[in-house]
């Protein structure tokens, strides 16, 4: 008990030093709640716990501090943090930034678009929004100010793009790896579900940046004059060469695996070493990539290939990581291990090999590389301190919830406040996440809100007849935990950006929150429209339609919130754009007004439907029964099914569900399975099977929505004189733009 008490106190002190007093305050609040249960308001009242019981539960079991959160943090989150730190130490961060400048600097608002794309690329290296702001913003914020953007908007764009780095697969911060344990699906599946919303959010931010550039008449950075034919030839060769290289890499690895079997790993490792040596031999023919000075005017843009050729070897650890995660489907920890081994090898040998090829001082290059490797290992460990302490302290909160039964109390409280309305409930959770995020890191915020509220959303949604996928709820919590890094009054990413731009952090935060509205609306959409998470997608045509409509909807939403489409929008035009956006995001809502969404079938058809469902599809059904508390329960559940099997009962057991021979009674629910996480219990009866109704396709909603957006565009085009406003900007309009900017 003495050891446990001292451990808790030392953890709180470490939290104060690493994360500040707000996180300590939250932990102490939950500790006080543990002991003050009998004196709490009736809705959250409990019998309390003794000091001995508290210390046993928090320190000596795996229910508290040494629980899932800290376990995941130490198992593989550290490897990803170390991987990103070493990759940046090797120079990959600067390399990615320079490629973004070379590719996008010539566009209108190019420097701001560089900030967006480089933050997306930096999301592979760093899972922290603040470190993303600091590493990229030092360059991009002064560069944006050079092109006419105000300091507030430059900082807001960098902050808005940096927080999205945490939602960009394949490395999505520590919280994403916790989802593997909380949701019970492989990390490759989480990446698949998170991909489309992340890309759509970045595309929308690029569009917002473009609109801001139009408003102020921003000019692109000049690039070397090249004949159109030569430019098209270069672009074509670059695109075709990249596609050919990726195809050769993918099919070459598959061919090696087929030809060499168990020895393929050694053959591929040898081939990787050969490619590494060849890329360094080629890079040695050119000078190293200089780190750009943001205080020096950028007179012309570098050529993309001139930048790319200096760091082709940086792609090797990224290929290793993505291949292990997505193709081999190794665990996140093992994937990060092999990727980290690759980048350690590069960091230790890159300098000496370049010196060897250039016939420079080899011993000096070797000493410098080893010093950088040691420094990178130390920096990776220091970068992990905050995450490790945050997850350990969050364990106190999780332990309090399991010790006092606070989770069940929150279910009743939220149900009472929201009246069972899922939209109101989601809005409450979003506000809770934003408030908590003011004082605690994203990872701790996610652990707390996901533990408290994710089961509540699934349970109340199921009772309301809405089968919400568990991954949608966890991504909802994750998104709003990240949004807390930019929303005033304590948006850490906005404060970091304002420190670089030397502007007011509150103004930067409000402007960044405006830019991030397109990220905030996406979670509300994919909870009700799981197709955005690529759930229930059937075939390439369906995928193409979902991607196209998602991009169109998020761009219309961005145009409406920015008040600028073809030209400056009037209020009623923005309102029409929002209506069109809603129709594209939620076509089911409009169809539900006329047609039923599902057809109810008898429970006796349950096993037949399980057998007939294609691989990877979900089956929706209604269950009724008595809960473990003795209450009558009726809920709608959506259960993901794996690959088809001859025996439907075996297929259900793979999902964690056992049923009676007639398929109408649940006999067993696997511990820790997806079925258990959705709230199913043994003894529930299956009372109905819900199949999608035969009704008109979404196309008949998309068509009028796009026509409405086209009408607004036509009206604005006519008002602008038939030309985009930036091509016919008059003195008065320029003055109005400057006034608006001020």
Image: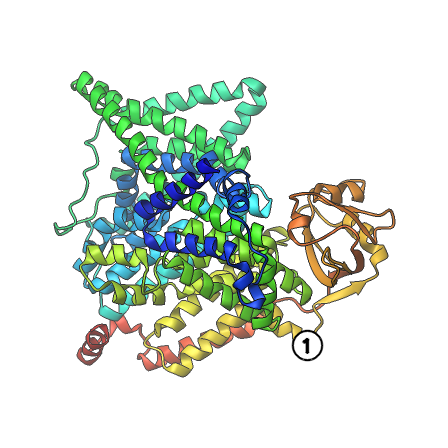
The answer to which of 95 and 25 lies nearer the viewer is: 25
Left or right placement of residue 356 versus residue 523 in this view: left
The residue sitting at 27% across, 68% down in the picture is 214
Residue 257 in picture, x, y percent from top left: 55, 24
**Quarter occupied by residue 423:** bottom right
Residue 554 at what x, y percent from top left?
45, 64
Mark 1 is surrounded, within 10 Å at the Cα level, by few (under 14), some (14 to 19) or many (20 or more) other residues, namely few
Q: In this view, does 466 lie above or below 249?
A: below
**Secondary structure state at the residue bearing disc 1:** loop
Q: How is the image coloured?
A: rainbow
Kindly give the residue lying farthest to the left in the view shown. Answer: 296
> In the image, residue 49 lies at what x, y percent?
55, 51
Q: Is residue 442 shown left or right of residue 137?
A: right
Residue 7 against residue 28 in the figure, above or below: above
Q: What percent of the width, then of the height, locates residue 268?
A: 47, 22
* Residue at horizontal 26 percent and vertical 58 percent from the top: 495
Q: Is residue 384 left or right of residue 258?
A: left
Q: Name the residue under label 1.
A: 594
Q: Above or below — where is 366 with respect to 190?
A: above
Which residue occupies the extreme right position in the image? 662
Snapshot quadrant of residue 497: bottom left
């Amino acid at each position: 008990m003495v050891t446990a008490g001292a451990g808790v106190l030392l953890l709180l002190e470490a939290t104060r030093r690493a994360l500040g007093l707000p996180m300590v305050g939250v932990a102490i609040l939950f500790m006080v709640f543990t002991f003050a249960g009998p004196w709490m308001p009736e809705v959250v009242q409990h019998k309390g716990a003794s000091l001995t019981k508290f210390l046993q539960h928090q320190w000596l079991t795996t229910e508290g501090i040494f629980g899932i959160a800290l376990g995941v943090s130490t198992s593989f989150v550290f490897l990803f943090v170390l991987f990103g730190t070493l990759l940046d130490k090797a120079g990959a961060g600067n390399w990615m930034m320079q490629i973004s400048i070379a590719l996008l600097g010539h566009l209108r608002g190019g420097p701001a678009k560089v900030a967006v794309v480089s933050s997306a690329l930096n999301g592979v290296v760093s899972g922290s929004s603040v470190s993303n702001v600091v590493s990229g913003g030092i360059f991009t914020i002064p560069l944006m100010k050079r092109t006419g953007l105000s300091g507030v908007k430059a900082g807001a764009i960098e902050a808005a793009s940096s927080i999205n780095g945490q939602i960009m697969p394949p490395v999505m911060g520590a919280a994403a790896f916790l989802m593997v344990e909380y949701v019970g699906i492989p990390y490759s599946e989480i990446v698949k579900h998170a991909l489309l919303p992340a890309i759509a959010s970045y595309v929308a931010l690029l569009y917002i940046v473009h609109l801001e550039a139009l408003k102020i008449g921003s000019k692109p950075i000049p690039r070397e004059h090249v004949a159109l034919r030569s430019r098209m030839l270069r672009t074509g060769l670059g695109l075709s060469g990249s596609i050919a290289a990726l195809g050769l890499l993918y099919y070459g690895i598959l061919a090696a695996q087929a030809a060499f079997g168990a020895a393929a790993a050694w053959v591929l490792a040898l081939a990787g070493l050969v490619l590494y040596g060849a890329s360094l031999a080629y890079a040695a023919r050119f000078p190293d990539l200089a780190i750009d000075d943001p205080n020096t005017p950028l007179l012309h843009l570098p050529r993309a290939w001139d930048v790319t050729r200096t760091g082709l070897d940086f792609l090797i650890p990224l290929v290793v990581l993505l291949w292990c995660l997505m193709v081999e489907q190794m665990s996140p920890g093992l994937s990060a291990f092999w990727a980290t081994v690759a980048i350690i090898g590069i960091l230790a040998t890159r300098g000496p090999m370049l010196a060897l090829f250039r016939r420079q001082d080899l011993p000096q290059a070797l000493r410098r590389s080893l010093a950088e490797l040691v420094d990178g290992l130390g920096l990776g460990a220091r970068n992990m301190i905050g995450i490790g302490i945050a997850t350990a302290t969050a364990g106190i909160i999780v332990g309090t919830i399991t010790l006092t039964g606070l989770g069940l109390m929150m279910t009743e409280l939220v149900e009472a406040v929201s009246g069972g309305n899922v939209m109101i409930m989601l809005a409450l959770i979003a506000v809770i996440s934003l408030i908590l995020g003011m004082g605690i890191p994203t990872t701790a915020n996610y652990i707390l809100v996901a533990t408290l509220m994710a089961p509540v959303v699934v349970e109340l949604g199921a009772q309301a007849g809405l089968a919400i996928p568990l991954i949608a709820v966890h991504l909802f919590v994750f998104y709003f935990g990240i949004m807390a890094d930019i929303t005033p009054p304590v948006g850490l990413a906005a404060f970091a950006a304002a420190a670089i731009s030397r502007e007011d952090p509150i103004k930067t935060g409000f402007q960044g929150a405006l830019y991030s509205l397109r990220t905030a609306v996406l979670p509300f959409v994919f909870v009700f429209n799981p197709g955005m998470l690529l759930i229930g997608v059937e075939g390439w045509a369906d995928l193409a339609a979902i991607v196209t409509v998602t991009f169109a909807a998020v761009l219309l939403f961005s145009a409406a919130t920015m008040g600028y489409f073809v030209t400056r929008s009037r209020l009623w035009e923005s309102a029409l754009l929002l209506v069109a956006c809603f129709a594209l995001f939620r076509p089911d809502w409009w169809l539900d007004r006329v047609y039923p969404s599902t057809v109810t079938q008898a429970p006796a058809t349950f096993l037949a439907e399980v057998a007939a469902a294609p691989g990877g599809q979900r089956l929706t059904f209604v269950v009724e029964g008595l809960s473990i508390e003795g209450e009558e329960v009726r809920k709608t559940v959506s259960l993901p099914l794996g690959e088809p099997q001859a025996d439907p009962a075996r297929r259900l057991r793979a999902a964690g569900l056992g049923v009676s021979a007639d398929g109408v009674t649940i006999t067993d629910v696997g511990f820790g399975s997806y079925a258990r996480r959705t709230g199913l219990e043994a003894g529930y009866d299956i009372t109905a099977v819900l199949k999608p109704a035969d009704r008109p396709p979404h196309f008949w909603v998309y068509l009028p929505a796009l026509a409405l957006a086209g009408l607004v565009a036509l009206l604005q085009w006519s008002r602008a004189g038939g030309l985009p406003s930036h091509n016919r900007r008059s003195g008065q309009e320029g003055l109005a733009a400057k006034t608006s900017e001020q």
